[in-house]
Image (cartoon, rainbow, N blue to C red):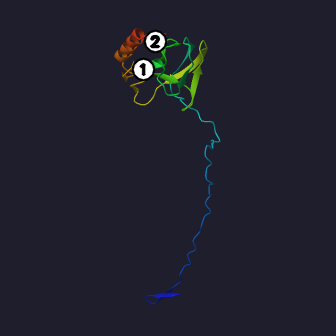
Amino acid sequence: MKKTNGKTKKRRSQKKIIKKKEVARPMMPGEYVLASEPVMCNTNRKTVKITVKNKGDRPCQIGSHTHFFEVNRALDFPREKAFGYRLNIPAGTSIRFEPGDSKEVELCEIGGARVCFGFNGLTMGSLNSSMVMRAAVEKAQKQGFNGA
């Protein structure tokens, strides 16, 4: 008991409540930790299906985030339809096209700022610009890209 101003007060004993934290074990190299629910990707993006044929003599492997319009010139498909789109597959994966093979693929709209530079140097600007698209199609035709 403690006296303050002539009054006696009882001290409350403060007990700390220690909650047991769930201690996670360290992850193993290469281990996958999967969500309990399926993850849906690209749900609010426009998609388009096209048929692609490899007319070349070597396999072509296309990654998930490549601007599909600019892929290998030996792949034959309607390139204008693929302008501003990429493969609708999980990040970090790819699709392989063997010589002579024909496959139907689903493409989804490229998100973010929608600006492309590099790849085969065809687009070099905004995917929203019809002027950039016309210039890219002309370059693809001049450079011998199948389907352009």
Q: Looking at the image, which is closer to me, 10 or 37?
A: 37
| Disc 2, SS | loop
Please tell me which of labels 1 and 2 falls first in the chain: 1
Q: Looking at the image, which is closer to me, 148 or 144?
A: 144
In the picture, which quadrant includes the C terminus? top left
Residue 97 image-quadrant placement: top right
Using the numbered discs, state the Cα–Cα distance from disc 1 to disc 2 in whole angstroms: 10 Å
Residue 145 image label: 2
* Amino acid at the residue labelled 1: Asn
Mark 1 near mark 2, Cβ–Cβ under 8 Å? yes
Give the tally of numbered discs. Answer: 2
Identify the residue shown where x is 53% and y is 81%.
Answer: 11
Q: Residues within 10 Å of mark 1 (few under 14, many from 20)?
A: some
Q: Residues within 10 Å of mark 2 (few under 14, many from 20)?
A: many
Give the residue pinned by disc 1: 120
Residue 10 image-quadrant placement: bottom right
